[in-house]
Amino acid sequence: MPYTAVTALSHPGLVRDHNEDSLTAGPWTLCGTVTETPQTLVFPLGAPLVVAVADGLGGQPAGEVASALVARRLAALGPALDGEDAVRDAVKLCNHAVYVTADGAPELTGMGTTVAGLVIAEGEALAFNVGDSRVYDAGPDGLRRLSVDDNPPLPPGRRTTPVVTQTLGGGTAFRPVTPHLATAGAAPGDRFLVCSDGLTDPVPDEALGELLRVYDDGRAAFELWKAAIEAGGPDNITLAVVRIGA
């Protein structure tokens, strides 16, 4: 029977004092906590399965609250995400929920999060994102980014920036979002990576692609995390390696 294996890991890194990332894999969520080793969950391929990472905005209050809210909302909505319109509406609903939750709570004012994820169904993977967390297709031809970073243009020679131009929440007044969507095939043997920028800022795409070429599942997740740690672990690191099996 075809299945989807999701191997996930979340860690605060070496600089931050706590973890503001959250992760969704089907009905399972990991919110603002730490996994010492990669965890693998296996789901039958059929009904829509959502795998997503939400990265709470650093430098603003309650990033872990915003990311957990989004992760749990996506977990609840996951089985109903049966197409682009449903995914787009779900992301917009999450944005609205972040603002509503922060309204009237001074300690939550300005909280926000990025989000990036996949909805896996038979034969297709639908990627979505707002912000600079990422989704990659890790197929046999190499790593291909499916998400679109919401960052301003970078000056020559610079690869990363902490500035994001679109987030869920993140302001004192409601701002709508326009989710980025992309599709890819999802046949047995196909693999994907969903991750926060705590992985992609310190580790370039070329290194990510090489690690995913060499390793599968738990070992791949561990080696990706290790690469970010060895590069200084400057931010929270959350990732999910997604593999379609038969």
Image (cartoon, rainbow, N blue to C red):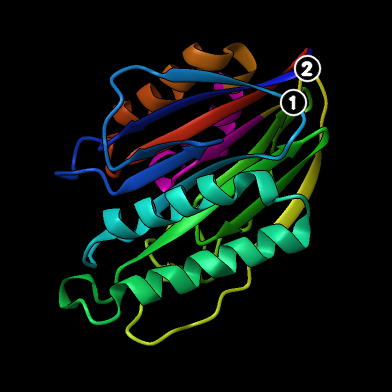
> Can you tell which quarter of the image residue 178 is in?
bottom right
Q: Relative to 202, say whether 102 is above or below.
A: below
- Residue stretch in magenta: 192-211
Q: Relative to 120, say whether 213 is above or below.
A: above
Q: Amino acid at mark 1?
A: Leu
The residue where tag 2 is placed is 2
Left/right placement of residue 205 relative to residue 199 reads right
Residue plotted at (79% across, 27% down): 141
Dots 1 and 2: beta carbons under 8 Å? yes
Which of the pair 6/134 is nearer the observer?
6
Please say whether residue 154 is visible from this viewpoint. no
Residue plotted at (51% across, 31% down): 240
Q: Residue furthest bottom?
A: 173
Residue plotted at (17% across, 78% down): 106
User: Does the magenta segment cover residue 235?
Assistant: no
> Can you tell which quarter of the image residue 138 is in?
top right
| Quadrant including the N terminus | top right
Q: Amino acid at mark 2?
A: Pro
The residue where tag 1 is placed is 45
Which of the pair 156/126 is nearer the observer?
126
Left/right placement of residue 143 relative to residue 225 reads right
Q: Pinpoint residue 229: horizontal percent, then vertical percent.
A: 30, 29
Neighbour tally class for label 2: few under 14, some 14-19, many 20 plus, Cα within 10 Å: few
Residue plotted at (23% across, 70% down): 108
Instruction: Give the alpha-carbon distance from disc 1 to disc 2, as whole Å.
Output: 5 Å
Please tell me which of labels 1 and 2 falls first in the chain.
2
Left/right placement of residue 30 relative to residue 143 reads left
